[in-house]
Amino acid sequence: MEILNNFSQIEVESPVDKIIKQIRDLITSGQLNAGDRLPSERKLSEKLGVGRTHLREALQKLEFYGILKTRPQSGTVVAGMGIPALEGLITDMLGLQGRDFKSLVETRVILETNIAQLAAENRSDADIIEIENALNAHRVKIEHNQDAVEEDLLFHLKIAEAGKNSVLNSLMLIITPDIMQYFKKHNVCGEGRAELAVKQHERLLQHIVDRNPDKAGEALKEHLREISEYVKTLKDGIKLNGNGSLT
């Protein structure tokens, strides 16, 4: 059995990754430039030979990271960043899919604790409205027993925006989607977690409203305590691969 340890699992590249890499290559080669408009989803899916579901997932992920932008009346266009920045961002984004899930969660706890404290200190009234709207959207999905991973993510991102630290906000955008993707596929925290998360979100928001950084930070740690305990049970070398499963 010892010789078996010298082998490693073969990771099959997903259609989504292949689409993202092709767009990266077009940007790097200068065939796609900032402001260029992409063809319609129908034309792209036919040209690439993939289903619209895979194409849409790739485009949504690129848009989430700010590499693509959707403009009314204009469709999907390449963001106004330089080629080196775009190419590097896509490369980093793809690389994150194979990183250590435990490290991602540990990093998230550190980041979000500070973000929650900053939000309590720096939030505006407009920020509170945005966070409340995100919380309400999350609550409605949970009450109707619907998947609410995206709404959960949006709530945390709105708090990051309220913290008024662009670097921390960018780091959140990088690490959180992969964590949420894992949650969605593996039901990490078990039954009843969704309802509890809503209540914890409510408490966290109240401390931000009250401008209490210490309590906001503690509320965030409590909110992430269960997933923090979960990753401690993962063995060294267990990683999250490109299709969202443990290897």
Image (spheres, grey):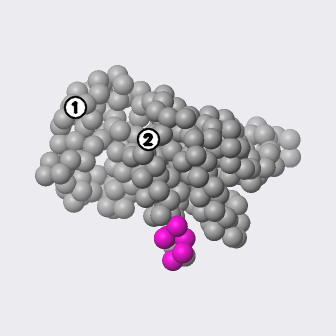
Q: Is residue 163 left or right of residue 182?
A: left
Q: In the image, is residue 236 above or below residue 80?
A: below
Number of marks in picture: 2
**Residue 124, which numbered label?**
2
The residue positioned farthest toward the bottom in the image shown: 144
Give the magenta part as a residue range. Answer: 139-144
Going 34% across and 55% down the picture, which residue do you hit? 55
Residue 63 place in picture, x, y as percent: 34, 45
Q: Secondary structure at mark 2?
A: loop
Residue sitting nearer the eye, 218 or 223: 218
Q: Measure how far apart labels 2 and 1 are at the Cα level.
A: 33 Å
Q: Main secondary structure of the magenta part?
A: helix
Residue 5 place in picture, x, y as percent: 79, 41
Residue sitting nearer the eye, 161 or 17: 161
Q: Residues within 10 Å of mark 2 (few under 14, many from 20)?
A: some
Residue 136 place in picture, x, y as percent: 47, 64
Going 48% across and 30% down the picture, which residue do you hit? 165
Q: Residues within 10 Å of mark 1 (few under 14, many from 20)?
A: some
